Amino acid sequence: MSARRAGGTRRRFRTVLGVPVPMVILSLVIAALLGAQLAKALEQSTTSSSHVTGASVDSDASTGKNSAGLAVVTEATLGTEVQRLVDTGTIQSMTSFDAAQCLREQGITESVLIMEEVSWGAEDTSGWLLVHGPVDRETLRANGGIISATVVLPTCGTGAHDEDPGQDRLWAGHVMIGSL
């Protein structure tokens, strides 16, 4: 049997650039469905499972500060805070804290570049964020790189834990800093 209709002619669909219109419509529908699925998958893959909310620590009214006005720092926000300190060049005076002695007690021979009194973690532990390394702050600002950061208790450097100076350390590690 032939594909011809009763009138002897075969029905032809209109074409767009040589492709039948129903095929073009079907292709567009499939592309839209795939696009929607990919968008949904991307949204799910980039959403944090812990739903951590971020906040700027530049202003006193932000949620990045505690009631005493100290920056609240965690392992997740430490890099951002160090970058902010390097960018702004903020240095707090060592009124009641001997950072150089603290670093010596911790066995660190590098000099302090920047320091800030902070509130560490969810426990709101009072401490000091010491940014230290073998380069000066201007070189770090200009070139970026990996810098050391140590968060210590205010008792660091006072000899309160002579038997184990590590008790004064809340966190120590390295942070990657970008250039300005």
Image (cartoon, rainbow, N blue to C red):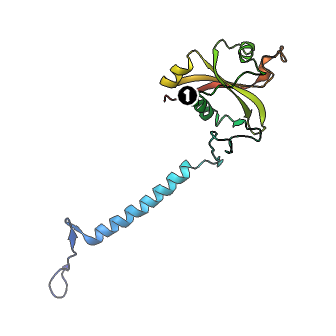
In percent of width and height, residue 148 lies at 62, 22
Q: Secondary structure at mark 1?
A: strand
Residue 27 lies in quadrant: bottom left
- Residue closest to the eye, 104 or 68: 68
Quarter residue 15 falls in:
bottom left
Within 10 Å of the Cα at label 1, are there few (<14), some (14-19), or many (20+) other Cα atoms? few
Q: How far across and down, in percent of the image, does residue 142 sit?
A: 48, 24
Q: Give the residue at x 62% y 39%.
A: 58
Count of picture labels: 1
Residue beneath the point at 78% across and 25% down: 153
Residue behind mark 1 = 176
Q: Residue furthest bottom?
A: 6
Answer with left or right where residue 136 lies relative to residue 112. Answer: left
Q: Nearer the viewer, residue 35 or 65?
A: 65
User: Which of the 4 quarters of the picture holds residue 78?
Assistant: top right
Look at the picture and state if 101 lies above or below 52. above
Residue pictured at 47% horizontal, 59% vertical? 37
Residue furthest to the left in view is 8
Q: Position of residue 99 (x, y in %)?
A: 72, 18
| Quarter the N terminus occupies | bottom left
Q: Is residue 31 left or right of residue 87?
A: left
In the image, residue 15 sits, relative to residue 93, either above or below, namely: below
Expressed as whole percent of the image width and height from the top left, the position of residue 42 reads 50, 52
Instruction: Using residue 46 as the reference point, say whether residue 168 is left or right of it.
Output: right
| Up-down relation of residue 129 to residue 106 (above or below) | below
- The amino acid pointed to by label 1 is Met
